[in-house]
Image: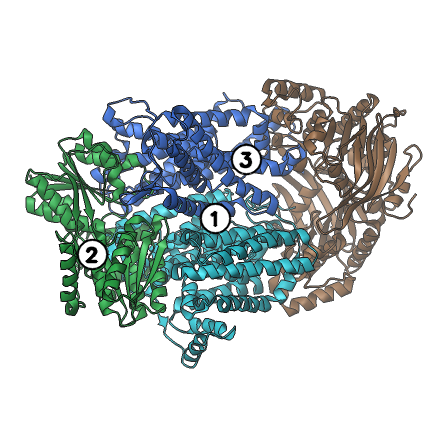
Amino acid sequence: MKSFNPRAIGLALLGPAIAIVASVLVTTLVIAAVGSSPGDFWSTMFDFPKPRSRVDIVNQTAMIYTAAVAAAIGFRMGLFNIGLEGQYTLASYAAAAFAGGAYLSGFANVFVSLLIAVAVGAAWSAIAGILKTTRGVSEVISTIMLNSIAITLVGYLLNKYGVHEGNTVHTTRIDLVSGWTPFENRDGEIWTLVIIAVLAGVGFWVLLNKTRFGFDLRASGQSETVAKASGVNPHRMIITAMALSGGVAGLIWMPALFGKATNFGLGTTFQAGLGFLGIAVALLGRNRPIGMLFGALLFAYLSVKSNDLTFATDVSPSIVQITQGVAVLAVVVAYEVVRRWRARLEQRVVAQELGTATEATA
Amino acid sequence: MTQESVAVELRGIGKRFPGVIANHDVDLTIRAGTVHALIGENGAGKSTLMKILYGVQKPDDGTIAINGREVALRTPTDAIANGVGMVFQHFMLADNLTVLENMVLGAEKLHGIGDRARAEIRRISDAFGFGLQPDVLVEKLGVADRQRLEIAKVLYRGACIIILDEPTAVLVPQEVDALFANLRELRNAGNAVLFISHKLDEVLAIADDITVMRRGTTVGTADPHTTTKRELAELMVGSELPSPETEESTVTDTVELTLANVTLADEFGRNLLTDVSLSIHRGEILGIAGVEGNGQAELVETIMGMRIPGGGTIHLGTEDVTHWHTRKLREAGIGYIPEDRHRHGLLLDAPLWENRILGHQTQAPNAKGPWINRSGARKDTQRIVAEYDVRAPGIDTPARALSGGNQQKLIVGREMSGDPVLLIASHPTRGVDVGAQAAIWDHIKRARRAGLAVLLISADLDELIGLSDTIQVILRGRLVGTFDPASVTPQDLGAAMTGGQAA
Amino acid sequence: MRRLTKLSAVAAVAALALAGCGSSDSGGSDGGSKPAASKDVCKTAKGDGPKIGLAYDVGGRGDQSFNDSAYVGLKKAVEEFKGSCVEGEASDGEPESAREDRLRNMADSGATAIIGVGFAYSDSVNAVAPDYPKVNFAIVDGFDPDTKPNANVAYLTFAANEGSYLVGVAAAEKTKTGQIGFVGGVHNDLIKGFEAGYVAGAKAVKPDIKVDIAYIQESDLKGFGDPAGGKAAATGEFDKGADIVYHASGASGSGVFDAAVEAGDGKWAIGVDSDQYLTATTAQKAHILTSALKRVDVATYDFIKTVNDGKPATSYTTYDLKNDGVGYATSGGFIDDIKSDIDGYKAKIVSGEIKVPTKP
Amino acid sequence: MTTTTTTPSPVSRVRNAARANWLFIALGAVAAVSLVRILTDTNDLTSVGTIRAAIIATCPILMAGLGGLWAERAGVVNIGLEGQMVLGTWGAAFFTYHSGSPWVGILGAALLGMIGGLLHAIATVTFGVDHIVSGVAINLIGVGATTYLAEATFTDLEGGGPRQLIGLPTPTTIDRIPGISGPAADLADKHWFFISDVASFVAALTTKISLLSLVIFALVVASGWILWKTSFGLRLRSCGENPQAAETLGVNVYLYKYVAVLISGAMAGIGGGFLALVASSGFSTNQTNGRGYIGLAAMIFGNWRPGGLLAGALTFGYTDSLRLRDTHAVHSLLLLVAVALIAITVLRIVRKQIAGAVAMAVPGAALLVWFLSTDSVPRDFTSMTPYVTTLFVLALGTQRLRMPAADGRPYRKGSAG
């Protein structure tokens, strides 16, 4: 429908609106049910964030958004890359290990490390693609298995080649890339490589809407048989899309590595779980660049602000996970309902405009 | 049971879908102990009416009376309880389940799911000569066996009103004969059989009564003993029957497509195509006649690069394209009107202009290098919509919202764009209204005059004879005969298609 | 009352209508358990003394391990110095910034002593401490990640290998089969230290003793929260002939205790970090020989005390046998008969006569 | 939906043969393990203790897989098993604590799992949401809700904490069955070829086994019976094979799908309950640790059939418990897998499937070399074993697997014809 059609916009906003209402409602009910005060909870959550929280939210949004883009690349062609978690863990380790080796200096080191992250993520993800095309293995199952394997593998490599310091093991420390400090120094900085998220988002949009490859990708997602008849090579498409998704996944943690962490350490500097958050946000944002931006912002906001809960309320921060999960479920249900309304509406519109109400189709 | 007792009486049935009226003012009377044929073009509303009678869909208006009693059929269960059974055009069987399991499903209370049921199946099978083995997986059954299983399913439930939706579409003639023998036995046993078809020969051969539907409603009845095929056909289309006029030959000497000994096997090593050789010249339309399921779809998919042949070669012009992929073939100038437009031709949820790009992603005006040329594609979509009379509110409308005919016109327009050298047209006018049908014929003929080579596959023999320069008949994956459309009759073709007499 | 509303409400949320459960639980539980508030000193303490921030590692208060131990020290200090406190807890997969934010929130709320429990706080304290020169920080198991010393950070480390050595001695003396076991949560350097001390202690008593070693996970920190894995690993060792199994596996330890219970009489488990006899269930108590103590409570209390005294501790403080920062527990009285032997080894370690290895 | 590639390969010829030889294959597997045990002198490979541990490790996976089986047989892919399972762990702890009876706790676990299933059914059946999407969301909710509920309800309990609740009563354990347990254990200790291995199984199944384990094995048998031998099961399966056909025959497809997904959730919940009450006798947050996913893999491994699922779950449970108990034994497994691969190679050469034979021979030879040239497997690799095994099985066997024909496809009423 035309972009300025108010009814279409209304319908488009209806889904998220229902989801937000549902998740707020469920969260409130759960809090009230265990005897805590939903008022305290919401006032803490809606309290305008402190400067350093604002910085954290931006940084977290960037990483979650990159993860969501990675997930969405697969989703848009009907591939469920559940393996983001393993892909970015392995890629982050590889990039951090390379950067720590300091084979190159300054910008070159950073750049090549990023390339390595992309390559490793893509390669790990492509395994699932190859298994699917050559052996018919569902990517859902294979990527779940690859997640577990990747995490164990990284632990092994880290133990074997990492720096043992105190009670931790990590990769060699690297020099940070200085970021942008919008507030006082102590409030932290917005990392330079947050730009990755911007590039990922814009790149995703351009790829999807402006390129032949993107068209093929979307066509494959809508109907495999139609895509094949239109000349898309389904096997190559699956492997390419998986690799692309994994490649972007490889970049997820890079802003943090070069902005703050200085090294990769399991349980310490490395932030696990972004892959699964990315999947959730991709679903929440319906795999659309802008939708996912809002989704990532919402998730980042919720998790950063949930830190304040322990100080101000007796509500446990883990409540936020319920809010996030309900939001995802509610949004997919709401969209399905809206889609059905819209399909009916469009058929009616066409029929009215053509005045062919008597034309029979059976 | 007397000939005069009425088994089913439909009065004033109406059914509306969002934006479409599928049935209105349908009246139908079926006598017990007869075979009643319901005929009409694709899209005339036959299937919807049958679904209403079987309780799959609820009518918005009208009444249904069965054996003189008015009934409300909300679900298939209600229909079954009232003695109505249905054999769907697309069989409703679960491949992974056995014959027995498919048979007793939903009717477990009758004879259990064990040995009693097994015995009952054997009884029915023996009574009508169905030859069913209860413990075989359905996936191993051939088409005719599946159909007999479907009929047996209906009988198992004690139905006395049996609906068959286009039962002969997938059968070879011997199987059709066997089916008709079964139907006659059913009739003689006192059942009412409702037989849906658009094959007039068959209707005249089997039916006791005929009702004709057009544009969602019943338009008349006919007596098979006195009426002619021509009359029936005109009743169906509501006017003088259009027929593609043969034109003078435009066949040139340049060969555009050559298949030499092409062989294709399925994953079990059975041949789907055997030694298929043919050639099409520029300006020639080669028609392929055959009963559905004899390798036509595989032939098309092989030429289109969607399947890779196990043996033989395919040349486009002088180029060996045997192992080319679909994309490359399309870029080389092959247009493709697929048999099933929803499965192979359109992205239903995408707007028309994106569907214009489909299949031509790499070609002007849709693309510039690796980029999609949005404005070019949109402009060209406008052109197609205007030239091919695609009735749609705009090019941003999703394809799903269009009627079948308009969807098909869009596909034809798309595939004719960019001056193809070869057009593969599979059932180009199937499910299309009469006006659109004539328009599509005109477009194909015009392109032929301009030197296009066309491979035409159709179940409509008149269409084949009217359009083609040469007709070849395909039977069980082999080309079994070549005919000159100027002299051949549908009867000759029919005989060849069924292996009666290979010419 | 509060508990009751919680319960019935949860039941309502879950849409559970199991009448049996609801009624049996509301029978007489009202006064039965301690009200929640009394358990949490930070909810009630409003004293004018020092305000203390305690940032827990994943698992938080209630892990019946070192987080709880830190809380014990905190509670003692708050009550003694009439102070107040604020707590925060890490969650799985949280970013570094969340830990920093937690520490800064505590500092901003006026805490003058802030303790991060667990080595994961090392980097965050290092980043935060310079911004709050008037606040004193401490990290349990922590270390300074860079060469620039922090003037207001204390690193509280533990010679866990020494405590493990003593329980190794106890195990070797008590074993009847000549075979003992060890279950580690995660095969990392920290836990390897426990293993090394334990094996060394056992071999010191019986050089030919057989020690089975098992780890629940190699690198995945889930190994500290997998009681089923702990139980399977310990059962394996009992099956193979060990009669005493020492665990250093955090919350997975409850599975190790259960394995000992199921293995039957004469089979023992040894606890870790805190005196786990005290928090164990009745059935488990009969099988907990001793526990290797890592006195996080002492370290926590000591640190707060130095702050309260105006002479805040900084730099590295190692808690070992010498200052009773590690040790072993005697609750249950199962090792009273060999206490003098163990203390003999202890004296030798304190005197430096025995050097306990830190790596297996 | 392309969650699982449909592989239209009706190799049912093979499958029927396999079914006929089911017992033969099982015995062959035992013989192979026995051979490796004797060759490598690793008696722990089939000791009573190992098998008992394997059974305990198997049960939760089995229940998750059984949950998957019920849902997928009715055409609903349930990737939310993990979430339903984790809800079950909380339910088991909560209800056991407050009722004092572990059996009430198991019912509670089933109930909580069912709530997860209900959510999934509403989303996928009523609203036609993509099954994977809904499953992912349910996993999020399940984990979040469990963590939150545990903090809210267990913190102040005796034996409880914000993340755990221990000291719960456990379901009855059968200590021994007189006349069977003893002789079987004696026989197992003799370490004879084959006989002792079988005796080990018998001993493990009759000695110190939780009644709940037996209930779970009974549930597998019962599920098989219900799904394949009753009209209820036939109707349910028809919804997974061809819901349109089922609808035309008067089957209320929505109802059966709902029932199937609810049972699926309950099964996964019971799996969580087993984990909390038997495998570790106490609740702790996130203790499922991905077992829901493994259960799903086991079900696919088992070709959507109870027998196969049991074999798959046992394989996972066995390798997982072996890795925890004896790393040396894992080294012997290398030989076992190598032997198996080489056996398949020979079989394929006999059948003249040369390409397939090479595909088996290469990893087989590599494993053999690895086994012969090393004394142990790096510990890290042992933790990967279950996952790598799954990948291998799927990669080598997917062509033979056949999922329900309409599995994962959205279905809407009135779409028949």
Up-down relation of residue A341 to residue B88 (above or below): above
Question: Dot 3: what SS?
Answer: helix
Where is residue D291 shown, x and y percent of the image? 43, 54
Q: Name the residue at 35% across, 32% down.
A: A256
Rendered hue of chain B is brown
Look at the image and tell me whether residue B23 can be seen: yes
> To which residue does mark 2 refer?
C163
For label 2, the crowd category at 10 Å Cα-Cα, with few meaning under 14, some 14 to 19 and many 20 or more, is many
Chain of the residue that carries numbered disc 1 in the rendered image: A
Q: Is residue C336 left or right of residue D92?
A: left
> To which residue does mark 1 refer?
A145
Q: Name the residue at 57% across, 32% down.
A: A217
Where is residue B167 shown, x and y percent of the image? 75, 49
Between tags 2 and 3, which lies in front?
A: 2
Q: Is residue A349 left or right of residue A203?
A: right
Rendered hue of chain A is blue
Where is residue D22 shown, x and y percent of the image? 59, 66
For label 3, the crowd category at 10 Å Cα-Cα, with few meaning under 14, some 14 to 19 and many 20 or more, is many
Look at the image and tell me whether residue B157 can be seen: no
Chain shown in green: C
Between tags 1 and 2, which lies in front?
A: 2
> To which residue does mark 3 refer?
A241
Rendered hue of chain D is cyan
Chain of the residue that carries numbered disc 3 in the rendered image: A
